[in-house]
Amino acid sequence: MSEQTFYMAVSIIVYLLIVLIIGVKFSKSNNTVSDFYLGGRKLGPIVTAMSAEASDMSSYLLMGVPGVAFLSGAAEASWTAIGLAIGTYINWLLVAKRLRNYSQITNSITIPDFFSDRFKDKKRILTMIAAIVIIIFFIPYTASGFAACGKLFGTLFDVEYHIAMIVSAVVIIFYTTVGGFLAASTTDFIQSIIMSIALVIVFVFGIISAGGIDSVIENTKDLPGYLSLTESYVKESGMANDYGFIMIVSTLAWGLGYFGMPHILLRFMAIEDSEKLKISRRIASVWVVISLAVAVLIGIIGFGMVKNGALTTFDDPETVIIQISNLLGSNGIFFALVAGVIIAGIFASTMSTADSQLLAASSAVSENIIGNLFKIKNSRNMSMIIARVTLVIIAVIAIFLAWDPESSIFGIVSFAWAGFGAAFGPVILFALFWKRTNMWGAFSGMVCGGVAIFVWKYLVRPMGGIWDIYELLPAFIIACAAIIIVSLLTKAPSKEIIEEFEKARETYGGIR
């Protein structure tokens, strides 16, 4: 191990020790399953905001987005970032307070719980379907995070991919299993700070190494479509493809995914005081806009660094930040330690999402399937044991799914993101805003949205042309149509449901 690598490793190890200590500390706060999965609704506004966005901005923020920008230029990465920024703000504005208050009235501690409790689904049909959706999409989503860790440490320390991936997964599993939701949220808050530091340092150092902004532009302007928002550069042909209106709308549709992300929605449910969500919304929105913009620029700057010889050519574009960090670390002990912080930031972006996904998937199995569906009653201690064992089992499955080192982080995330956005997003919105929505409407929306993701991605989209649309957009529309049509064709909600809806609406207040 070189001196540079040693000092980078020191920074990373210190960071890992901190998150492990946090996990142990919060283990004492988990007295009930509600504490383990929702933190007893004790989150403050700043932790709520930053943990929500850190759990949202997984490895695709520091690896996926820069990788796309590096490979194909500004268009796809920029429109994706714009869609995510808009979706973040609207989700906080329209959903956060409503879901927080409504879920407290129904006494729901998971998203599947909320669906069944909202529509008085005594047979817990919605709970079962929602739990299945979570398992289908969250396990591969978590696997993408483990894969990112494997790529990260494999590239940096020349460690075999599978060993690096397993060690990383064990750390995430430990602090999440021991500390639960409060540990995950607190570490997510810390991780968001580290991610921010990493982005700023890489951005500044990258510009300096590339010879300044003018040099970056000069080194990329001759590539057809690279700096355009209406064209996309194709490396294989050296030509530009049109990135027209349909593709722009399709990419902006990433923002629709926020309405259905269980690990983000849980943060809304967990805040201690719903009146403080306005503070959370402002913090989250500003952070997301700045972080995504910098991530896109880093990809473009990295390409400029390769063009002017500051960086040597490398095979995987998703490792562009790692390559820049390695270059930074070669400038002495201090910069090696700083580079270690950057790598810790990439690790943080992965961990902050993986821990939340593990909790959501675990709750779907232990609470919504074992507990509610099969009506198995356990003592408080046994419920905690089941919750933790379930989390470990799901993590092990994710490790096996992450076994292929060639898997694309961006590709896996985009598919899982679409799945949750289409299956849960429309149901959440209609449950909160349309009192005529009934259980069968919600059921139809969830099933149609989830199925449409697979149908569109694997059967329709491959036809190309006007059908080459990100599967989230058509699936989201199909789910909304299913909710409306089925709700109107079936029996109206009971008086009890309507009264509870009105009670919840009274707590919303104005949009502030």
Image (cartoon, grey):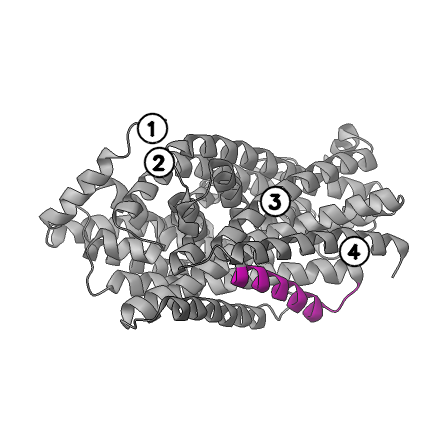
Q: Which of marks 3 and 4 is nearer the N terminus?
A: 4
Residue type marked 4: Ala
Tell which of 154 and 269 is nearer to you. 269
Q: Mark 2 points at which residue?
A: 94
Q: Earlier in the sequence, mark 3 or mark 1?
A: 3
Residue type marked 3: Ile
Mark in the foreground, 2 or 4 = 4
Q: How far apart are marks 1 and 4 (CA)?
A: 47 Å
Q: Mark 3 points at which residue?
A: 190
Task: Tell me the chief SS of the magenta region.
Answer: helix
Residue type marked 1: Ile
The segment highlighted magenta reads 158-178
Q: Looking at the image, which residue is at 43% across and 46% down?
A: 267
Q: How far apart are marks 2 and 4 (CA)?
A: 43 Å
> Based on the displayed image, in which of its 4 quarters is residue 194 positioned?
top right
Q: Mark 1 points at which residue?
A: 511
Tell which of 449 and 249 is nearer to you. 449
Q: Which of marks 2 and 3 is nearer the N terminus?
A: 2
Above or below 501: residue 318 = below
